[in-house]
Amino acid sequence: MSNLDPVTLVVIKNGLQQVCNEMDLAFCRAAFSPVISEAMDRSDGIYHRDSGDLIAQGDLGLPIFVGTMQFSTQAVIARAKDIRPGDVFIVNDPYLGGTHLMDVRFVKPFFYQGKLFAWLANTGHWPDIGGMVPGGFSANATEVEQEGLRLPPVKLYKEGRLDEEILSIILSNIRIADQRIGDIKAQAAALSIGEKRLTALIDRYGPGTVDAAVAELRARASQQMRAKIATIPDGTWVGEAFVDSDGVVDEPLRIALSIEKRGEEMTFDLSGSSPPCQGPMNSVIATTRSSIYLAIKHIFPEVPINAGTFEPLHVIDPKGTFLYAEYPRPVSGCAAEVSQRIAEAVFAALTPALPDKLFAAPAGTSGNLALGGVDPARGRAYVMYVISGGGYGGSMAGDGISNGCSTIGISKTTPIEVMEQYYPVLFDEVSLNEGSGGAGKTRGGFGLNYAITLRRGEARASMVMDHGRFGPQGALGGGDGGLNRVHVTRDGVSYTPPHLSKDQDIRIKAGDRIRVSTPGGGGFGDPRLREAALVARDVARGYYTPAEAAARFGVVLTALGEVDQAATSAARDRLAAAGKPA
Protein backbone atom coordinates (compact mmCIF):
# COMPACT_ATOMS: atom_id res chain seq x y z
CA MET A 1 0.00 0.00 0.00
CA SER A 2 1.20 3.56 -0.75
CA ASN A 3 1.59 6.46 1.64
CA LEU A 4 -1.07 8.52 -0.15
CA ASP A 5 -3.63 9.95 2.22
CA PRO A 6 -7.19 8.68 1.57
CA VAL A 7 -8.54 12.09 0.58
CA THR A 8 -5.91 12.65 -2.12
CA LEU A 9 -6.40 9.11 -3.38
CA VAL A 10 -10.15 9.44 -3.82
CA VAL A 11 -9.83 12.89 -5.40
CA ILE A 12 -7.37 11.54 -7.99
CA LYS A 13 -9.59 8.51 -8.56
CA ASN A 14 -12.58 10.72 -9.25
CA GLY A 15 -10.40 13.04 -11.33
CA LEU A 16 -9.33 10.20 -13.63
CA GLN A 17 -12.96 9.12 -13.92
CA GLN A 18 -13.98 12.68 -14.77
CA VAL A 19 -11.39 12.85 -17.55
CA CYS A 20 -13.00 9.79 -19.14
CA ASN A 21 -16.53 11.10 -18.59
CA GLU A 22 -15.68 14.36 -20.33
CA MET A 23 -14.24 12.44 -23.25
CA ASP A 24 -17.49 10.44 -23.42
CA LEU A 25 -19.62 13.58 -23.43
CA ALA A 26 -17.46 15.36 -26.01
CA PHE A 27 -17.63 12.34 -28.31
CA CYS A 28 -21.42 12.08 -28.00
CA ARG A 29 -22.08 15.78 -28.52
CA ALA A 30 -19.85 16.13 -31.58
CA ALA A 31 -20.57 12.83 -33.36
CA PHE A 32 -22.57 12.85 -36.58
CA SER A 33 -24.05 9.35 -36.43
CA PRO A 34 -27.14 8.79 -34.23
CA VAL A 35 -25.77 5.41 -33.14
CA ILE A 36 -23.01 7.33 -31.33
CA SER A 37 -24.67 10.64 -30.47
CA GLU A 38 -28.05 9.22 -29.41
CA ALA A 39 -27.61 5.49 -28.79
CA MET A 40 -24.22 6.08 -27.07
CA ASP A 41 -22.53 3.06 -28.62
CA ARG A 42 -18.98 4.13 -27.70
CA SER A 43 -16.50 4.33 -24.85
CA ASP A 44 -13.39 6.23 -23.68
CA GLY A 45 -10.56 5.27 -21.32
CA ILE A 46 -7.04 5.82 -19.97
CA TYR A 47 -4.43 3.06 -20.25
CA HIS A 48 -0.98 2.37 -18.77
CA ARG A 49 1.97 3.67 -20.80
CA ASP A 50 3.90 0.37 -20.78
CA SER A 51 1.40 -2.45 -20.34
CA GLY A 52 -1.72 -0.90 -21.86
CA ASP A 53 -3.65 -2.03 -18.78
CA LEU A 54 -6.87 -0.19 -17.96
CA ILE A 55 -6.51 2.76 -15.55
CA ALA A 56 -9.98 4.31 -15.85
CA GLN A 57 -13.02 4.18 -18.11
CA GLY A 58 -15.96 6.57 -18.44
CA ASP A 59 -19.23 5.88 -16.64
CA LEU A 60 -21.07 6.22 -19.95
CA GLY A 61 -18.96 3.62 -21.77
CA LEU A 62 -20.12 0.19 -22.85
CA PRO A 63 -19.06 -2.58 -20.43
CA ILE A 64 -18.07 -4.88 -23.30
CA PHE A 65 -15.32 -2.40 -24.18
CA VAL A 66 -13.80 -2.59 -20.68
CA GLY A 67 -11.64 -5.55 -21.59
CA THR A 68 -11.39 -5.23 -25.36
CA MET A 69 -10.07 -1.65 -25.37
CA GLN A 70 -7.32 -2.77 -23.00
CA PHE A 71 -6.33 -5.54 -25.40
CA SER A 72 -6.45 -3.33 -28.49
CA THR A 73 -4.34 -0.68 -26.75
CA GLN A 74 -1.79 -3.40 -25.99
CA ALA A 75 -1.80 -4.35 -29.68
CA VAL A 76 -1.07 -0.74 -30.63
CA ILE A 77 1.76 -0.49 -28.08
CA ALA A 78 3.33 -3.66 -29.48
CA ARG A 79 3.31 -2.25 -33.03
CA ALA A 80 3.77 1.49 -32.51
CA LYS A 81 6.99 3.04 -33.78
CA ASP A 82 8.37 6.57 -33.44
CA ILE A 83 5.39 7.83 -31.45
CA ARG A 84 5.09 11.58 -31.03
CA PRO A 85 2.69 14.02 -29.40
CA GLY A 86 -0.41 14.42 -31.54
CA ASP A 87 -0.24 10.95 -33.09
CA VAL A 88 -3.53 9.02 -33.20
CA PHE A 89 -3.69 5.38 -34.24
CA ILE A 90 -6.82 3.89 -35.79
CA VAL A 91 -7.52 0.14 -35.53
CA ASN A 92 -10.54 -2.15 -35.85
CA ASP A 93 -8.86 -5.53 -36.47
CA PRO A 94 -10.91 -8.01 -34.40
CA TYR A 95 -7.94 -10.33 -33.98
CA LEU A 96 -5.86 -7.56 -32.38
CA GLY A 97 -7.91 -7.13 -29.25
CA GLY A 98 -11.10 -6.04 -30.97
CA THR A 99 -14.75 -6.91 -31.34
CA HIS A 100 -16.42 -6.60 -34.75
CA LEU A 101 -15.22 -4.36 -37.56
CA MET A 102 -17.82 -1.64 -36.93
CA ASP A 103 -16.23 -0.83 -33.56
CA VAL A 104 -13.41 1.51 -34.59
CA ARG A 105 -10.78 2.44 -32.00
CA PHE A 106 -8.63 5.54 -31.79
CA VAL A 107 -5.53 5.23 -29.57
CA LYS A 108 -3.41 8.25 -28.68
CA PRO A 109 -0.15 8.50 -26.72
CA PHE A 110 -0.38 11.07 -23.92
CA PHE A 111 2.78 12.97 -23.14
CA TYR A 112 3.40 15.04 -20.02
CA GLN A 113 6.35 17.42 -20.10
CA GLY A 114 7.80 15.54 -23.05
CA LYS A 115 7.53 12.06 -21.54
CA LEU A 116 5.01 9.34 -22.36
CA PHE A 117 2.69 9.12 -19.34
CA ALA A 118 -0.31 7.07 -20.56
CA TRP A 119 -2.45 6.18 -23.55
CA LEU A 120 -5.91 7.57 -24.26
CA ALA A 121 -8.30 5.46 -26.31
CA ASN A 122 -11.88 5.40 -27.44
CA THR A 123 -14.21 3.25 -29.49
CA GLY A 124 -17.08 4.36 -31.70
CA HIS A 125 -19.55 2.17 -33.55
CA TRP A 126 -19.44 3.35 -37.16
CA PRO A 127 -22.76 2.74 -38.93
CA ASP A 128 -20.94 1.26 -41.91
CA ILE A 129 -17.47 -0.18 -42.55
CA GLY A 130 -18.01 -1.58 -46.05
CA GLY A 131 -18.50 -5.28 -46.69
CA MET A 132 -21.35 -7.26 -48.17
CA VAL A 133 -24.27 -5.39 -46.63
CA PRO A 134 -25.03 -1.88 -45.37
CA GLY A 135 -24.27 -1.63 -41.67
CA GLY A 136 -21.72 -4.45 -41.53
CA PHE A 137 -23.99 -7.04 -39.90
CA SER A 138 -23.64 -9.72 -42.54
CA ALA A 139 -25.54 -12.75 -41.32
CA ASN A 140 -24.13 -15.02 -44.05
CA ALA A 141 -20.46 -14.02 -44.15
CA THR A 142 -17.99 -16.90 -44.18
CA GLU A 143 -14.78 -14.85 -43.97
CA VAL A 144 -13.91 -11.55 -42.35
CA GLU A 145 -13.21 -9.76 -45.63
CA GLN A 146 -16.90 -10.04 -46.46
CA GLU A 147 -17.74 -8.10 -43.31
CA GLY A 148 -15.89 -4.91 -44.19
CA LEU A 149 -12.63 -2.98 -44.14
CA ARG A 150 -10.10 -4.34 -41.60
CA LEU A 151 -7.58 -1.83 -40.28
CA PRO A 152 -4.35 -2.74 -38.46
CA PRO A 153 -2.93 -0.06 -36.13
CA VAL A 154 -1.94 2.85 -38.40
CA LYS A 155 -1.42 6.53 -37.69
CA LEU A 156 -4.49 8.40 -38.89
CA TYR A 157 -3.14 11.58 -37.29
CA LYS A 158 0.57 12.34 -37.39
CA GLU A 159 1.66 14.98 -34.87
CA GLY A 160 -1.84 16.40 -34.89
CA ARG A 161 -2.36 16.44 -38.65
CA LEU A 162 -4.89 14.17 -40.34
CA ASP A 163 -3.23 11.89 -42.90
CA GLU A 164 -5.33 12.54 -46.00
CA GLU A 165 -3.96 9.51 -47.85
CA ILE A 166 -4.99 7.02 -45.15
CA LEU A 167 -8.32 8.81 -44.79
CA SER A 168 -8.94 8.49 -48.55
CA ILE A 169 -8.30 4.74 -48.39
CA ILE A 170 -10.84 4.39 -45.57
CA LEU A 171 -13.48 6.57 -47.22
CA SER A 172 -13.07 4.75 -50.54
CA ASN A 173 -14.06 1.46 -48.92
CA ILE A 174 -17.14 2.38 -46.89
CA ARG A 175 -20.66 3.55 -47.62
CA ILE A 176 -21.90 7.06 -46.79
CA ALA A 177 -18.26 8.10 -46.68
CA ASP A 178 -19.10 11.82 -46.79
CA GLN A 179 -20.83 11.46 -43.42
CA ARG A 180 -17.93 9.71 -41.65
CA ILE A 181 -15.65 12.71 -41.37
CA GLY A 182 -17.93 14.12 -38.65
CA ASP A 183 -17.51 10.99 -36.53
CA ILE A 184 -13.76 10.85 -37.16
CA LYS A 185 -13.22 14.41 -36.02
CA ALA A 186 -15.50 13.90 -33.01
CA GLN A 187 -13.59 10.80 -31.99
CA ALA A 188 -10.25 12.61 -32.26
CA ALA A 189 -11.61 15.69 -30.47
CA ALA A 190 -12.69 13.56 -27.50
CA LEU A 191 -9.09 12.41 -27.07
CA SER A 192 -7.89 16.01 -27.24
CA ILE A 193 -10.29 16.88 -24.43
CA GLY A 194 -8.83 13.99 -22.46
CA GLU A 195 -5.33 15.37 -23.00
CA LYS A 196 -6.29 18.76 -21.62
CA ARG A 197 -8.11 17.40 -18.57
CA LEU A 198 -5.45 14.83 -17.71
CA THR A 199 -2.73 17.47 -18.04
CA ALA A 200 -4.60 19.71 -15.60
CA LEU A 201 -4.93 16.84 -13.11
CA ILE A 202 -1.21 16.04 -13.25
CA ASP A 203 -0.32 19.74 -13.04
CA ARG A 204 -2.18 19.86 -9.75
CA TYR A 205 -0.78 16.73 -8.09
CA GLY A 206 2.40 15.93 -9.98
CA PRO A 207 3.20 12.86 -12.13
CA GLY A 208 4.73 10.92 -9.22
CA THR A 209 1.63 11.28 -7.06
CA VAL A 210 -0.74 10.38 -9.90
CA ASP A 211 1.39 7.34 -10.77
CA ALA A 212 1.32 6.23 -7.14
CA ALA A 213 -2.46 6.69 -7.04
CA VAL A 214 -2.91 4.60 -10.20
CA ALA A 215 -0.91 1.74 -8.67
CA GLU A 216 -2.81 2.02 -5.38
CA LEU A 217 -6.20 2.06 -7.07
CA ARG A 218 -5.30 -1.06 -9.04
CA ALA A 219 -4.18 -2.88 -5.88
CA ARG A 220 -7.38 -1.91 -4.07
CA ALA A 221 -9.63 -2.98 -6.96
CA SER A 222 -7.93 -6.37 -6.96
CA GLN A 223 -8.33 -6.61 -3.19
CA GLN A 224 -12.03 -5.72 -3.39
CA MET A 225 -12.71 -8.22 -6.16
CA ARG A 226 -10.91 -10.94 -4.23
CA ALA A 227 -13.03 -10.18 -1.17
CA LYS A 228 -16.20 -10.52 -3.25
CA ILE A 229 -15.04 -13.78 -4.82
CA ALA A 230 -14.34 -15.16 -1.34
CA THR A 231 -18.09 -14.97 -0.62
CA ILE A 232 -18.78 -17.56 -3.34
CA PRO A 233 -18.66 -21.15 -2.05
CA ASP A 234 -15.62 -23.09 -3.23
CA GLY A 235 -16.33 -25.66 -5.90
CA THR A 236 -17.03 -26.16 -9.59
CA TRP A 237 -20.03 -24.38 -11.04
CA VAL A 238 -21.31 -25.17 -14.52
CA GLY A 239 -23.60 -23.34 -16.90
CA GLU A 240 -24.47 -23.28 -20.55
CA ALA A 241 -26.17 -21.12 -23.15
CA PHE A 242 -27.03 -21.49 -26.82
CA VAL A 243 -26.73 -19.26 -29.87
CA ASP A 244 -29.62 -19.80 -32.33
CA SER A 245 -27.32 -20.49 -35.28
CA ASP A 246 -24.29 -19.02 -37.00
CA GLY A 247 -26.36 -17.53 -39.83
CA VAL A 248 -25.01 -20.04 -42.37
CA VAL A 249 -25.60 -23.48 -40.83
CA ASP A 250 -29.01 -23.66 -39.19
CA GLU A 251 -27.87 -25.46 -36.05
CA PRO A 252 -27.43 -24.08 -32.51
CA LEU A 253 -24.01 -23.31 -31.06
CA ARG A 254 -23.39 -24.39 -27.48
CA ILE A 255 -21.47 -22.40 -24.89
CA ALA A 256 -20.34 -24.82 -22.18
CA LEU A 257 -18.84 -23.13 -19.12
CA SER A 258 -17.13 -24.57 -16.07
CA ILE A 259 -16.07 -22.20 -13.27
CA GLU A 260 -13.54 -23.41 -10.74
CA LYS A 261 -13.70 -21.25 -7.62
CA ARG A 262 -10.97 -21.60 -5.02
CA GLY A 263 -10.40 -19.08 -2.27
CA GLU A 264 -10.17 -15.63 -3.80
CA GLU A 265 -9.77 -16.61 -7.45
CA MET A 266 -11.90 -17.99 -10.28
CA THR A 267 -10.93 -19.95 -13.39
CA PHE A 268 -13.26 -20.04 -16.39
CA ASP A 269 -13.11 -22.96 -18.82
CA LEU A 270 -15.11 -22.78 -22.08
CA SER A 271 -13.25 -25.58 -23.87
CA GLY A 272 -16.38 -27.77 -24.12
CA SER A 273 -18.13 -25.28 -26.40
CA SER A 274 -18.98 -25.83 -30.07
CA PRO A 275 -16.16 -25.79 -32.64
CA PRO A 276 -15.52 -22.77 -34.90
CA CYS A 277 -18.52 -22.01 -37.08
CA GLN A 278 -18.84 -21.03 -40.73
CA GLY A 279 -20.93 -17.92 -40.12
CA PRO A 280 -20.25 -14.64 -38.26
CA MET A 281 -20.98 -15.82 -34.73
CA ASN A 282 -17.37 -16.63 -33.88
CA SER A 283 -15.93 -14.65 -30.98
CA VAL A 284 -12.38 -13.31 -30.82
CA ILE A 285 -10.61 -14.04 -27.54
CA ALA A 286 -10.61 -10.38 -26.46
CA THR A 287 -14.41 -10.32 -26.62
CA THR A 288 -14.69 -13.71 -24.92
CA ARG A 289 -12.58 -12.52 -21.98
CA SER A 290 -14.35 -9.19 -21.79
CA SER A 291 -17.72 -10.96 -21.70
CA ILE A 292 -16.66 -12.84 -18.59
CA TYR A 293 -15.32 -9.67 -17.00
CA LEU A 294 -18.55 -7.78 -17.57
CA ALA A 295 -20.64 -10.70 -16.26
CA ILE A 296 -18.73 -10.71 -12.98
CA LYS A 297 -19.00 -6.91 -12.82
CA HIS A 298 -22.79 -7.31 -13.14
CA ILE A 299 -22.70 -9.55 -10.08
CA PHE A 300 -20.40 -7.27 -8.06
CA PRO A 301 -21.16 -3.77 -9.43
CA GLU A 302 -19.61 -1.98 -6.47
CA VAL A 303 -16.05 -3.03 -7.38
CA PRO A 304 -14.37 -0.17 -9.30
CA ILE A 305 -13.15 -0.80 -12.86
CA ASN A 306 -9.46 -0.95 -13.67
CA ALA A 307 -6.98 -3.67 -14.53
CA GLY A 308 -6.86 -4.83 -10.91
CA THR A 309 -10.52 -5.80 -11.12
CA PHE A 310 -9.67 -8.61 -13.53
CA GLU A 311 -6.56 -9.99 -11.78
CA PRO A 312 -8.40 -12.75 -9.83
CA LEU A 313 -10.29 -13.84 -12.98
CA HIS A 314 -8.45 -16.42 -15.09
CA VAL A 315 -9.82 -17.41 -18.51
CA ILE A 316 -8.42 -20.52 -20.16
CA ASP A 317 -8.07 -19.83 -23.89
CA PRO A 318 -10.84 -21.96 -25.49
CA LYS A 319 -8.82 -22.85 -28.58
CA GLY A 320 -10.62 -25.10 -31.01
CA THR A 321 -14.02 -23.55 -30.25
CA PHE A 322 -16.07 -20.75 -31.81
CA LEU A 323 -15.11 -18.62 -28.79
CA TYR A 324 -11.49 -18.35 -29.94
CA ALA A 325 -11.82 -17.00 -33.46
CA GLU A 326 -8.71 -16.80 -35.62
CA TYR A 327 -8.28 -15.24 -39.04
CA PRO A 328 -10.20 -15.46 -41.36
CA ARG A 329 -13.25 -16.49 -39.30
CA PRO A 330 -16.12 -13.96 -39.60
CA VAL A 331 -17.02 -12.26 -36.31
CA SER A 332 -19.69 -9.59 -36.85
CA GLY A 333 -21.99 -11.15 -34.24
CA CYS A 334 -19.41 -11.61 -31.50
CA ALA A 335 -19.64 -8.31 -29.61
CA ALA A 336 -23.37 -7.71 -29.74
CA GLU A 337 -24.67 -11.28 -29.49
CA VAL A 338 -22.19 -14.03 -28.55
CA SER A 339 -20.83 -11.90 -25.71
CA GLN A 340 -24.29 -11.87 -24.14
CA ARG A 341 -24.63 -15.64 -24.40
CA ILE A 342 -21.27 -16.00 -22.60
CA ALA A 343 -22.50 -13.70 -19.84
CA GLU A 344 -25.73 -15.71 -19.67
CA ALA A 345 -23.71 -18.90 -19.13
CA VAL A 346 -21.84 -17.18 -16.26
CA PHE A 347 -25.13 -16.12 -14.66
CA ALA A 348 -26.60 -19.61 -15.06
CA ALA A 349 -23.53 -21.20 -13.46
CA LEU A 350 -23.39 -18.90 -10.43
CA THR A 351 -27.09 -18.43 -9.64
CA PRO A 352 -27.22 -21.52 -7.37
CA ALA A 353 -24.13 -20.22 -5.54
CA LEU A 354 -25.36 -16.62 -5.19
CA PRO A 355 -29.16 -16.68 -5.45
CA ASP A 356 -29.47 -13.40 -3.53
CA LYS A 357 -27.21 -11.53 -5.99
CA LEU A 358 -28.16 -13.08 -9.29
CA PHE A 359 -31.17 -13.21 -11.56
CA ALA A 360 -32.72 -15.09 -14.43
CA ALA A 361 -31.34 -14.37 -17.89
CA PRO A 362 -32.11 -11.01 -19.46
CA ALA A 363 -33.20 -10.63 -23.11
CA GLY A 364 -29.56 -10.92 -24.12
CA THR A 365 -29.66 -9.54 -27.65
CA SER A 366 -28.89 -6.11 -29.03
CA GLY A 367 -31.40 -6.69 -31.82
CA ASN A 368 -29.06 -5.41 -34.54
CA LEU A 369 -31.06 -4.26 -37.55
CA ALA A 370 -29.47 -2.31 -40.40
CA LEU A 371 -31.34 -0.71 -43.29
CA GLY A 372 -29.45 0.84 -46.17
CA GLY A 373 -30.49 2.55 -49.38
CA VAL A 374 -30.84 5.88 -51.15
CA ASP A 375 -33.46 8.42 -50.10
CA PRO A 376 -34.88 9.75 -53.39
CA ALA A 377 -36.28 12.85 -51.70
CA ARG A 378 -32.84 13.91 -50.50
CA GLY A 379 -30.74 12.33 -53.21
CA ARG A 380 -28.31 10.79 -50.74
CA ALA A 381 -27.42 7.36 -49.42
CA TYR A 382 -28.08 6.32 -45.84
CA VAL A 383 -27.48 3.45 -43.43
CA MET A 384 -29.86 3.23 -40.47
CA TYR A 385 -28.83 1.11 -37.51
CA VAL A 386 -31.36 0.08 -34.87
CA ILE A 387 -30.64 -1.51 -31.51
CA SER A 388 -33.50 -2.43 -29.21
CA GLY A 389 -34.16 -3.36 -25.61
CA GLY A 390 -35.76 -6.38 -23.98
CA GLY A 391 -36.89 -7.76 -20.65
CA TYR A 392 -34.63 -8.28 -17.65
CA GLY A 393 -34.80 -11.47 -15.64
CA GLY A 394 -36.64 -11.79 -12.36
CA SER A 395 -34.67 -11.96 -9.10
CA MET A 396 -35.13 -12.20 -5.37
CA ALA A 397 -35.52 -8.43 -5.39
CA GLY A 398 -38.57 -8.50 -7.67
CA ASP A 399 -39.84 -8.72 -11.22
CA GLY A 400 -37.49 -7.85 -14.08
CA ILE A 401 -37.81 -4.47 -15.74
CA SER A 402 -39.23 -4.20 -19.24
CA ASN A 403 -37.45 -2.85 -22.33
CA GLY A 404 -34.08 -2.57 -20.59
CA CYS A 405 -30.77 -2.14 -22.40
CA SER A 406 -28.61 -5.12 -23.35
CA THR A 407 -26.28 -7.01 -21.04
CA ILE A 408 -23.17 -5.65 -22.72
CA GLY A 409 -23.82 -1.96 -22.40
CA ILE A 410 -25.85 1.09 -21.63
CA SER A 411 -26.63 1.78 -25.27
CA LYS A 412 -30.19 2.79 -25.87
CA THR A 413 -32.47 2.84 -28.87
CA THR A 414 -32.09 5.98 -30.92
CA PRO A 415 -35.27 8.07 -30.43
CA ILE A 416 -37.71 7.19 -33.18
CA GLU A 417 -38.26 10.89 -33.90
CA VAL A 418 -34.56 11.19 -34.73
CA MET A 419 -34.60 8.15 -37.00
CA GLU A 420 -37.72 9.33 -38.79
CA GLN A 421 -36.02 12.70 -39.35
CA TYR A 422 -32.76 11.22 -40.65
CA TYR A 423 -34.14 8.32 -42.71
CA PRO A 424 -37.14 7.62 -45.01
CA VAL A 425 -38.96 5.42 -42.50
CA LEU A 426 -42.05 5.53 -40.32
CA PHE A 427 -42.27 3.72 -36.99
CA ASP A 428 -45.94 2.76 -37.00
CA GLU A 429 -45.77 0.61 -33.86
CA VAL A 430 -43.81 0.65 -30.62
CA SER A 431 -45.46 -1.44 -27.93
CA LEU A 432 -44.83 -3.82 -25.04
CA ASN A 433 -44.33 -7.43 -26.09
CA GLU A 434 -47.03 -8.76 -23.79
CA GLY A 435 -46.64 -12.33 -22.60
CA SER A 436 -42.87 -12.39 -23.21
CA GLY A 437 -41.85 -12.27 -19.53
CA GLY A 438 -40.89 -15.72 -18.23
CA ALA A 439 -43.07 -17.11 -15.42
CA GLY A 440 -41.62 -17.36 -11.92
CA LYS A 441 -42.11 -16.42 -8.31
CA THR A 442 -40.82 -13.16 -9.71
CA ARG A 443 -41.49 -12.93 -13.43
CA GLY A 444 -39.27 -11.65 -16.19
CA GLY A 445 -39.70 -8.19 -17.68
CA PHE A 446 -41.20 -7.79 -21.13
CA GLY A 447 -39.59 -7.10 -24.45
CA LEU A 448 -41.06 -4.73 -27.00
CA ASN A 449 -42.56 -4.76 -30.46
CA TYR A 450 -41.69 -2.24 -33.12
CA ALA A 451 -42.58 -1.95 -36.77
CA ILE A 452 -40.89 0.09 -39.49
CA THR A 453 -42.46 1.00 -42.82
CA LEU A 454 -40.26 2.25 -45.65
CA ARG A 455 -41.77 5.50 -46.89
CA ARG A 456 -39.93 5.96 -50.17
CA GLY A 457 -37.30 4.41 -52.39
CA GLU A 458 -35.84 0.95 -52.03
CA ALA A 459 -33.61 -0.49 -49.28
CA ARG A 460 -31.76 -3.59 -48.12
CA ALA A 461 -32.32 -4.91 -44.61
CA SER A 462 -29.97 -7.14 -42.62
CA MET A 463 -30.14 -8.36 -39.06
CA VAL A 464 -28.00 -10.22 -36.54
CA MET A 465 -30.08 -10.95 -33.45
CA ASP A 466 -30.50 -13.93 -31.15
CA HIS A 467 -32.88 -15.82 -28.83
CA GLY A 468 -35.16 -16.61 -31.76
CA ARG A 469 -34.90 -20.35 -31.07
CA PHE A 470 -34.23 -20.45 -27.31
CA GLY A 471 -35.71 -17.92 -24.91
CA PRO A 472 -33.65 -16.34 -22.10
CA GLN A 473 -33.16 -18.91 -19.36
CA GLY A 474 -35.28 -19.00 -16.25
CA ALA A 475 -33.53 -19.54 -12.92
CA LEU A 476 -34.23 -21.82 -9.95
CA GLY A 477 -37.37 -23.28 -11.52
CA GLY A 478 -38.50 -20.19 -13.41
CA GLY A 479 -39.72 -20.32 -16.99
CA ASP A 480 -37.79 -19.05 -20.02
CA GLY A 481 -38.51 -15.65 -21.50
CA GLY A 482 -40.28 -15.16 -24.81
CA LEU A 483 -38.52 -15.48 -28.16
CA ASN A 484 -37.19 -12.91 -30.60
CA ARG A 485 -39.42 -12.67 -33.68
CA VAL A 486 -38.89 -10.99 -37.07
CA HIS A 487 -41.51 -10.67 -39.80
CA VAL A 488 -41.10 -8.79 -43.07
CA THR A 489 -44.13 -7.92 -45.19
CA ARG A 490 -43.35 -7.33 -48.88
CA ASP A 491 -46.19 -6.63 -51.33
CA GLY A 492 -48.57 -7.97 -48.68
CA VAL A 493 -46.72 -11.29 -48.33
CA SER A 494 -45.18 -12.17 -44.96
CA TYR A 495 -41.59 -13.42 -44.80
CA THR A 496 -39.87 -15.00 -41.78
CA PRO A 497 -36.07 -15.47 -41.88
CA PRO A 498 -35.14 -19.16 -42.13
CA HIS A 499 -32.65 -18.67 -39.27
CA LEU A 500 -35.33 -16.81 -37.28
CA SER A 501 -33.05 -14.10 -35.88
CA LYS A 502 -30.45 -13.67 -38.65
CA ASP A 503 -30.70 -12.73 -42.30
CA GLN A 504 -29.25 -10.30 -44.82
CA ASP A 505 -30.00 -8.47 -48.04
CA ILE A 506 -33.78 -8.52 -47.63
CA ARG A 507 -34.85 -6.14 -50.36
CA ILE A 508 -37.82 -3.93 -49.58
CA LYS A 509 -39.54 -1.02 -51.29
CA ALA A 510 -41.85 1.79 -50.28
CA GLY A 511 -44.79 0.49 -48.27
CA ASP A 512 -43.06 -2.69 -47.13
CA ARG A 513 -42.86 -3.30 -43.39
CA ILE A 514 -40.43 -4.91 -40.91
CA ARG A 515 -41.81 -5.95 -37.51
CA VAL A 516 -39.59 -7.10 -34.64
CA SER A 517 -40.54 -8.53 -31.24
CA THR A 518 -37.72 -8.66 -28.70
CA PRO A 519 -37.34 -11.30 -25.95
CA GLY A 520 -38.61 -11.03 -22.41
CA GLY A 521 -36.48 -11.93 -19.39
CA GLY A 522 -36.50 -15.31 -17.68
CA GLY A 523 -38.56 -16.03 -14.58
CA PHE A 524 -36.96 -16.55 -11.15
CA GLY A 525 -38.20 -19.29 -8.82
CA ASP A 526 -41.19 -21.65 -9.00
CA PRO A 527 -44.11 -19.89 -10.79
CA ARG A 528 -46.57 -21.66 -8.47
CA LEU A 529 -45.17 -19.59 -5.61
CA ARG A 530 -46.10 -16.29 -7.22
CA GLU A 531 -48.86 -14.53 -5.35
CA ALA A 532 -52.17 -15.03 -7.11
CA ALA A 533 -52.97 -11.34 -6.63
CA LEU A 534 -49.86 -10.38 -8.59
CA VAL A 535 -50.85 -12.70 -11.42
CA ALA A 536 -54.34 -11.18 -11.43
CA ARG A 537 -52.78 -7.70 -11.56
CA ASP A 538 -50.63 -8.70 -14.55
CA VAL A 539 -53.68 -10.07 -16.36
CA ALA A 540 -55.66 -6.92 -15.61
CA ARG A 541 -52.86 -4.87 -17.14
CA GLY A 542 -52.83 -7.03 -20.26
CA TYR A 543 -49.40 -8.55 -19.63
CA TYR A 544 -50.80 -12.10 -19.85
CA THR A 545 -54.09 -13.51 -21.05
CA PRO A 546 -56.19 -15.52 -18.56
CA ALA A 547 -55.20 -18.66 -20.47
CA GLU A 548 -51.48 -17.80 -20.17
CA ALA A 549 -51.92 -17.14 -16.45
CA ALA A 550 -53.45 -20.56 -15.92
CA ALA A 551 -50.87 -22.38 -18.07
CA ARG A 552 -47.77 -20.64 -16.69
CA PHE A 553 -48.63 -19.81 -13.08
CA GLY A 554 -51.51 -22.16 -12.31
CA VAL A 555 -53.78 -19.19 -11.50
CA VAL A 556 -57.39 -19.35 -12.75
CA LEU A 557 -59.36 -16.12 -12.99
CA THR A 558 -63.11 -15.59 -13.24
CA ALA A 559 -64.68 -13.39 -15.86
CA LEU A 560 -64.42 -10.49 -13.39
CA GLY A 561 -60.70 -11.03 -12.97
CA GLU A 562 -61.01 -12.53 -9.51
CA VAL A 563 -58.93 -15.53 -8.51
CA ASP A 564 -60.82 -18.82 -8.38
CA GLN A 565 -58.96 -20.38 -5.46
CA ALA A 566 -60.21 -23.94 -5.94
CA ALA A 567 -59.49 -23.96 -9.67
CA THR A 568 -56.10 -22.34 -9.04
CA SER A 569 -55.13 -25.05 -6.55
CA ALA A 570 -56.09 -27.76 -9.02
CA ALA A 571 -54.26 -26.07 -11.88
CA ARG A 572 -51.08 -25.76 -9.81
CA ASP A 573 -51.34 -29.42 -8.87
CA ARG A 574 -51.49 -30.29 -12.57
CA LEU A 575 -48.40 -28.17 -13.23
CA ALA A 576 -46.54 -29.93 -10.44
CA ALA A 577 -47.58 -33.36 -11.67
CA ALA A 578 -46.42 -32.49 -15.19
CA GLY A 579 -43.10 -31.28 -13.82
CA LYS A 580 -43.53 -27.97 -15.62
CA PRO A 581 -42.31 -24.91 -13.73
CA ALA A 582 -44.02 -22.61 -16.20
Image (spheres, rainbow, N blue to C red):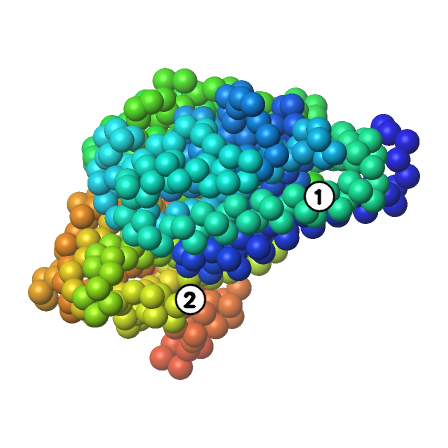
Image point (38%, 76%), residue name: 558
Q: Which residue is mark 1?
A: 198
- As drawn, is 92 to the left or to the right of 502? right
N-terminal-most mark, 1 or 2: 1
Of residues 26 and 62, which is closer to you in this image? 26
> What amino acid is found at the position of numbered circle 1 in the picture?
Leu
> Real-space Cα distance between discs 1 and 2?
33 Å
Q: Is residue 336 visible?
A: yes
Considering every residue shown, the one lying at the far bottom of the view is 560
Q: Which mark is residue 73?
A: none
Image point (77%, 31%), residue name: 211
Q: Is residue 35 above or below residue 415?
A: above
The secondary structure type at the circle numbered 2 is loop
Of residues 20 and 566, which is closer to you in this image? 20
Rendered image quadrant of residue 319? top left
Image point (34%, 40%), residue name: 168
Structural crowding at the residue carrying mark 2, measured as other residues with C-alpha within 10 Å and reported as few (<14), some (14–19) or many (≥20): few
> What amino acid is found at the position of numbered circle 2 in the picture?
Pro
Considering every residue shown, the one lying at the far top of the view is 320
Q: Is residue 411 visible?
A: no
The secondary structure type at the circle numbered 1 is helix
Q: Which residue is mark 2?
A: 415
Q: Is residue 572 above or below residue 264?
A: below
